[in-house]
Amino acid sequence: SYLSSALEEPAPRYVAARDSVVAFHQPHFGRHRWELPLWPNPLAVDHPSACGAFAAALLAGAVATPMGDVRERLAGKPSVCARPEGRSQKRVVELVASLQRRGVASRAALATQWRKDPRYLLPEMLGWMKNGQGYALEKLWPKIVASTVQGVAVVKAIEPSAGNMKEHHSVEHRKRREDEKSAGGAGAGAPGSKRAKVVKKKVKKNAKALGSGLSIWD
């Protein structure tokens, strides 16, 4: 079995849930080369298609939600940035080239650049607005930048470090022991026991414990 190279159709796309661009490959199996379902694979930022797919997502509002407020004012379809025919359009070339120069193909990388230079990409994005509509983007720009920078900061803030996780589990263990003693030795599985309540509460707060999946279509 083997994978084809990255396909042009369907075009690579940015997946917000993973904060990365994925391309699709065609797997084949056996000597008869039976085709299996398409396989998504993350693209490196230096891949020629990565920044184009990210540019399409940025224009469409998938990276910075406020950008969706000016979607109807765009002079072209954002998806063209991720397609071969877009390479001949000036506004596509300029936006993608600016992303490539700074190696930006994820929300985290964009937030890093906007912390240093809040006007980064504004000239290129203005080139995507219909005649006379640039003022709407300029007015919205501070909100677009802030939503991206703050959003990334929040994600990093809630990601627990290994040390914090260890300390958290230790505290949880001590609490369970104390709850069991105060409950007079009630079993862990007893419906009314405090430990059962603690475990139930913990499962609700842990998305992974609920078996939530991650789809590339998210």
Image (cartoon, helix red, strand yellow):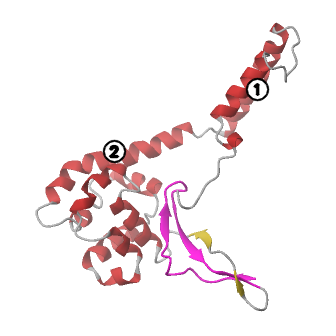
The x and y percentages for residue 200 are 72, 27
Q: CA distance from mark 1 to mark 2?
A: 37 Å
User: Which disc is residue 146 wearing?
Assistant: 2
Q: Name which residue lies at 63% across and 80% down.
A: 26
Q: Name which residue lies at 33% across and 62% down.
A: 59
The x and y percentages for residue 165 are 69, 34
The x and y percentages for residue 135 are 14, 55
The x and y percentages for residue 157 are 52, 38
Q: Name which residue lies at 31% across and 54% down.
A: 68
Residue type highlighted by circle 1:
Ser
Q: Is residue 210 above or below residue 173?
A: below
Q: Name which residue lies at 36% across and 72% down.
A: 96
Q: Which quarter of the image is occupied by the N terminus?
A: bottom right
Q: Is residue 171 visible?
A: no
Q: Is residue 11 above or below residue 128?
A: below
Looking at the image, tell me whether mark 1 or mark 2 is earlier in sequence order. Answer: 2
Residue type highlighted by circle 2:
Ala
Label 1 secondary element: helix
Residue in front for this viewpoint, 52 or 78: 78
Is 170 left, or right, of 147 in this rendering? right
Q: Which residue is mark 1?
A: 170
Residue in front for this viewpoint, 207 or 134: 207
Residue range corresponding to the magenta coloring: 1-29
User: Which disc is residue 33 wearing?
Assistant: none
